[in-house]
Image (cartoon, grey):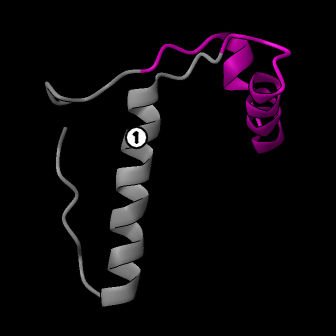
Amino acid sequence: MGAEDMVAELTDEDVRWSFDRVTDRIVDLVLGRTIEYPSPASLGARVVEVLDGMYRSAASGRFEAVARP
């Protein structure tokens, strides 16, 4: 790993996640059932940046740069 890599700490429970579970956590947060959401906002922002690069690459047919944080 490089000096700029982010490591997310995961519990044993988190390791057994599924897409439905992640969606349920977001819905619970929005509905006020919980005030905890363990993923940092910076991780979500990075995911969006990488997805943007993937979509640009698919559209252009070339490798597209994604800035390092």
Residue drawn where x is 23% and y is 72% of the image: 64
Q: Amino acid at mark 1?
A: Ala
Q: Which residues are magenta?
A: 8-36
Point 32% across, 89% down: residue: 61
Along the viewing direction, whichever of 68 and 26 lies nearer the viewer: 26
Above or below residue 43? Residue 15 is: above
Hey, which residue is sitting farthest left in the picture? Answer: 3
How many residues crowd mark 1 within 10 Å: few (<14), some (14–19), many (20+)?
few
Q: Which residue occupies 33% across, 77% down? A: 57
Nearest to the observer: residue 8 or residue 52: 52
On the image, which quarter does residue 19 sit in?
top right
Q: Quadrant of residue 36?
A: top right
Q: Nearer the viewer, residue 26 or 22?
A: 26
Seen in the image, is 50 located left or right of residue 33? Answer: left
Look at the picture and state if 52 lies above or below 9. below
Magenta region includes residue 35: yes
Q: Quick one: quadrant of the N terminus?
A: top left
Q: Is residue 49 left or right of residue 2?
A: right
Residue 32 picture location, percent across and down? 81, 18
Q: Which residue is identified by label 1? A: 45
Residue at (73%, 32%) from the top-left corner? 26
Give the mark count. 1
* In the depicted structure, whether residue 59 falls above or below residue 18: below
